[in-house]
Image (cartoon, rainbow, N blue to C red):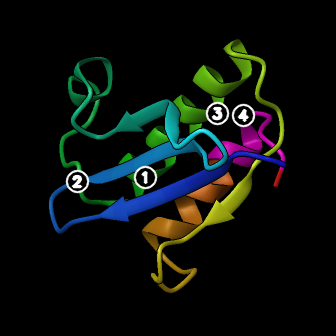
């Protein structure tokens, strides 16, 4: 069973985590609040931030040996920031 890439967005930030539902644990996470991303971003709630978070979570997942996930958009419409996060993760090598 593939782990799940979950997305949560607020007005000011966007968060992503890869969850192993069989064990109920978070394997990898990234957000626009992370120290390494926060310095690069002027605003955590825009499309550029979403793409950076997508690339960051894909990079961290690949480092842990996670190559394929199921995308869970969390009820949000697949548009704007949610779509950009997914595109950023795909560009960085994550498959879903």
Please provide the residue range marked out in magenta: 89-95
Closer to the camera in the image, 91 or 25: 25
Which callout, 4 or 2, points at the residue further toward the start of the chain? 2
What is the distance, in whole Å, between disc 4 and disc 2 at their CAs? 21 Å
Which callout, 4 or 1, points at the residue further toward the start of the chain? 1
Residue 58: mark: 3
Which callout, 1 or 2, points at the residue further toward the start of the chain? 2
What is the distance, in whole Å, between disc 4 and disc 1 at their CAs? 13 Å
- Residue shown at 55% from the left, 34% from the top: 57
What is the distance, in whole Å, between disc 2 and disc 3 at their CAs? 18 Å
What is the distance, in whole Å, between disc 1 and disc 3 at their CAs? 12 Å
Residue that sits furthest to the front in the current view: 23
Residue 35: mark: none
> Is there a contact, CB below 8 Å, between mark 2 and mark 3?
no
Left or right: where does residue 4 sit relative to residue 62?
A: left
Residue carrying label 4: 92
Residue carrying label 2: 13
């Amino acid at each position: 069973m593939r782990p799940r890439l979950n997305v949560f967005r607020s007005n000011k930030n966007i968060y992503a985590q890869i969850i192993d539902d069989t064990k109920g644990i978070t394997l990898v996470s990234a957000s626009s609040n992370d120290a390494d991303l926060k310095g690069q971003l002027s605003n955590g709630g825009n499309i550029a931030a979403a793409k950076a978070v997508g690339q960051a979570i894909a990079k961290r997942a690949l480092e842990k040996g996670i190559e394929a996930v199921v995308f869970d958009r969390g009820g949000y419409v697949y548009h704007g920031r949610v779509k950009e996060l997914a595109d950023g993760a795909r560009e960085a090598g994550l498959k879903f």
